[in-house]
Image: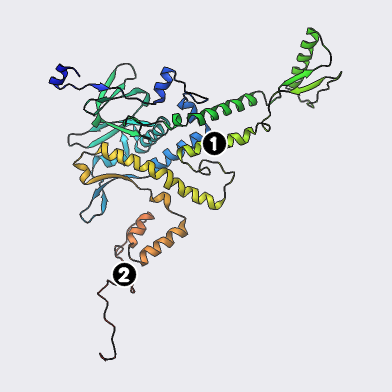
Amino acid sequence: MSLINRILGRETRSTIKSDDPYLSEWFGYRGGGMGGFVDPSRASGIAVAHACIAIVSQNLAAMPLNLYRRSANGGRERAADHPLYGVLHDMANPQQTAFEARELLLASLMVAGNAFARLEWNGRGQVTALYPLDNSRVAVERLESGRLRYRVAGEHGGSRTYLQEEILHLRYRLGRDGVMGLSPVQIARETFNLALVQQEQAGKQAKKSFLPEGALVFPNAIGKDQRQQVIDKLEAKINSDLSTRGVIVLDGGTEWRSFSFSSKDAEFLDSRKLTNLDICRIWGVPPTVAGITDDATYSNNDQESRALVVRCLAPMAKRLEQAMNAALLTTESRKSLFVEHDLAGLLRGDMKERYESYRVGREWGWLSPNEIRGWENLPAIDGGDEYLSPLNMTILGDREPEKTGEDE
């Protein structure tokens, strides 16, 4: 920084290195091997990739994201009177519901590794609206002070700059620069490139109706006219739309030699199945949840549904919660308020399992009837806030001494 800038306290910005797929596409980046730059729209269009993105984004967006206020006794209560509660729970902005905005942010996060939303504050320092932004229009600049500045390109030209407090920035996995998130599509670009190549190959074969490719071998040389005549007759026979027996007679010692691998020879279908499993592993989505049911049973279906919550949705929910707590609440507000998902609904079993767990909690005294009825969406009842105390459980020291013979 120059002497004048140092005296005036001017801030300068530094370039942030990023694997942003839109920048890679603009500069035509190609990596080594099969997996250079992967078009995120094509990669996310693969059936199993789309399923994984939809499962995570829709399930997590459907879960209640509540604003809580810490109570004096160490508990919590919903802060429904706060403007942010409605932004997270009902309407993110006048045009988008909370579900739509969160689903959009999560899908962008899973594909591009970054998701941005513009925040609207009122005069009391409270967020009143949240507007998701297009990743391709956002550029991040790091100032010399360490603060971030976001430059958003307009749809009709020009740009607008926002301060760090005006933007919600979600990151999939923090890069080396400590600012931008890494795109899982680009991290696993070899896998997605293989999947796209296999998809293209399957499309080419389907376009040709899986007709074989090969050569007709004659024992003796034939003229140019004869060669063209044979090719025309063969193509007319194979490519005919009429219903035929599909039988071709080759006489005169003519032999057919195929020079293309069949799907069975190349184990093409098994290879595609393995690639689909690899894509599920990238996002941590269990295969049966994504629709891969080759080895599915009733038992592992139930276990993988729980694994989806524990290993996939819960870490993603924590990533969102901490980013939102930091961006949507001021330092002073975070002392009494916090944002958190309610994932209990996804972990609940069937009716028999739920009622059995309710019985245990009720009999051992840590659940009241109204708490149980609230989880089952039933209205509260009079006297339903009381807790039971098992007769065989007392506080140590309060137990009456046993009577002995001398006392008698």
Q: Residue 276 carries which label?
A: 1
Query: 10 Å neighbourhood of mark 2: few (<14), some, or many (≥20)?
Result: few
Q: Is mark 2 on a helix, strand or loop?
A: loop
Vertical side of 243 occupied by 389: above or below: below
Name above or below for residue 219 compared with residue 203: above
Kindly tell me whether residue 28 is visible in this rendering.
yes
Residue 124 screen position, x and y as percent:
17, 37
Where disc 1 sits, the SS reads helix
Q: Is residue 338 left or right of residue 194?
A: left
Q: What amino acid does circle 2 point to?
A: Ser
Distance of label 2 from label 1 (alpha carbons) = 53 Å
Direction left: furthest residue? 7
User: Residue at the location (81% across, 23% down)?
Assistant: 248
Relative to 408, residue 100 above or below: above
Residue farthest right in this picture: 252
Q: Which amino acid does label 1 sit on?
A: Asn
Label at residue 389? 2
Q: Nearer the viewer, mark 2 or mark 1?
A: 1
Pick the front one: 301 or 270: 270
| Residue 87 visible in the shown view | no
Residue nearest the viewer, comparing 46 with 386? 46
Percent position of residue 218, x then y: 82, 16
For the C terminus, the quadrant is bottom left
Residue drawn at (55%, 35%), measured in percent from left and top?
275
